[in-house]
Amino acid sequence: MRKLSLLLALLITTITAFAQDVRPVKNVIVMIPDGTSVGVYSAARWYKFYNKMGDRLHIDPHFTGTVTTHSSNAPIGDSAPTGSTYATGVLQKTSNVAIYPEADSDNDIYPVDASRTYQPAATILEASRILQNKAVGLVVTCEFPHATPADFASHYHSRSAYKFIAPQMAYQNMDVMFGGGNGILTDDIKQHFKSNGTTLIQDDRNALLNYNGNGKVWALFGDRALPYDIDRNPDKVPSISQMTEKALEILSENKNGFFLMIEGSQVDWAAHANDPIGIITEYLAFDEAVGKVMDFAEKDGNTAVIIMSDHGNSGFTIGSKDCPGYDKLTIHQLFEAVSNYKLSANGIEAILVNTQPENIKSEFKKYTGIDITDEELQSLLSSKNYKEGDYTKVGTSNNLAHNIVNILNSRTCFGYTTGGHTGEEALLASYHPQDDILRGNVRNTDVNKYLQQVSGLEVSLQELSDNIFAKHGDVFAGEQYTINKKDPDFPVLTVKKGRNTLEIKAFSSVAKLNGKPFDIGSVVVYMDKNDTFYLPKKLVEKL
């Protein structure tokens, strides 16, 4: 009975969200400020006002509702499943990247089809490229195989498996991929770029911003993620706004249109760390990109934009239990201290680890305006050589950045409930040239339904999934095949019929027929959980 009621509620929500037809447009842009809670918008807006940068955000005129975002079996979502749901329409479990999840009958919020477990779920990016021949791209500030970008361009049961996610993203043959992650590139990926004519730009801001070619282009900065915007050297590393402008310029050359996902990746990271200036400035950098996108959409007249976070993070608020008299606190009391912070906690950490103890007080004041106490100095010295490797635990472990954050927050009136994700609704902003937008409260699955409609897809993502991600045993039923696991990470499916031999490598979009390479058209995914290759049904025709 409970499941029936939940299904009825979902049906009513869907009907409400799509009470009118959605007219398809040529270009679709999704923007995700990862981990941005409602309080972040408020703090960013007041920060701008206090620092005489204006009193509005670029996103402000476009708010239209909220999104209830969650995993398949939990109300509080992780970036991998929540972003995947935006991309695929399929609710997923923590750590899942664009697949159909395992059923968890006692906890699934809505019924899960256990017969599809581990099947890759086709994404809106894949559908735009494969079904509509549109240009596709991603712009992020994290390393390129991180959860949210991976959600749109790869498939696996574990978000941390960069070894399997990164090659899929390369073999998606995207027109644009801007972000971080040079240290993740492999020789195989670089060779594929040479084979398919992808230009690879590494740590060269000017080369990216001056790029005027007409081919596919990847531009990566740093070994992993880009620095926080407040810590960024603007002469060496582009802003998310600059990367967005270049992506729009390149993608809009395609006569069929484009799909672009832009993520302000590290609002989430700063929130995990409870870093106030990191949270505010990371969001403001993203908001500048929002301004560029909205300018483009309004001038273009054939572009839809949808903006929403994938989940909340940290319970960030203006006001805390440590600041009594909340209604009498002046704007100076609330925003003067944070406005003096010239670097994020990570940026300060990078300086202090190379600073002699006797100089730490003066260096700290240089970048924060704070005269630290002897006790605070000792807290920094006690953690000087310890750096937390997991960004999700910076706010909760005794690392240097955490102790810096404690000092920064002791001078502000911002509050936090956690160093992790939170379950509140995400703010929703929308733009459509004919105002066919999402309104009110919608679910994350509704966002994907809208993306399919506004993209004008004539084949559903589920149907596309069944066409390009069929089990190898079904595709080659009755044929002679083997799985070669000489390289256990990248097994090869070999199918023989008569004189023909078909070799299909895992996590690639290039196969070989009688030794001759050919493009499959979509990535082949191998799931170790069930020893299964998921690949296009049409491959059997090659034999």
Image (cartoon, rainbow, N blue to C red):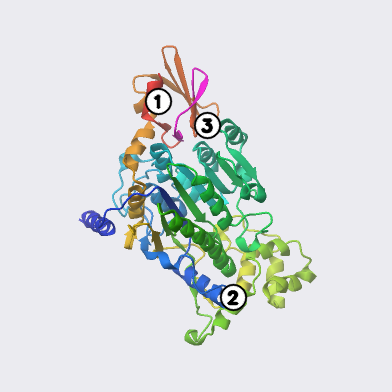
Instruction: Check the picture and name the quadrant holding the N terminus.
Output: bottom left
Q: Does the magenta stretch include residue 85?
A: no
Mark toward the viewer: 2 or 3:
2
Residue shown at the point (56%, 48%) measured from the top left: 178
Q: Which of marks 1 and 2 is nearer the N terminus?
A: 2
Residue 84 is situated, as x and y percent measured from the top left of the image, at 42, 49
Q: Is residue 221 left or right of residue 265?
A: right
Q: Which residue bears the numbered disc 3? A: 490
Find residue 263 and name its label. Answer: none
Q: Is residue 341 left or right of residue 417?
A: right
Q: Is mark 2 on a helix, strand or loop?
A: loop
Disc count in the image?
A: 3
- The image quadrant of residue 126 is top left
The residue at the far top in this view is: 499
Q: Which residue bears the numbered disc 1? A: 539
Amino acid type of disc 2?
A: Asn
Q: Which of marks 2 and 3 is nearer the N terminus?
A: 2
Q: Which residue bears the numbered disc 2? A: 51
Q: Which of marks 1 and 3 is nearer the N terminus?
A: 3
270, above or below 369, in the image: above
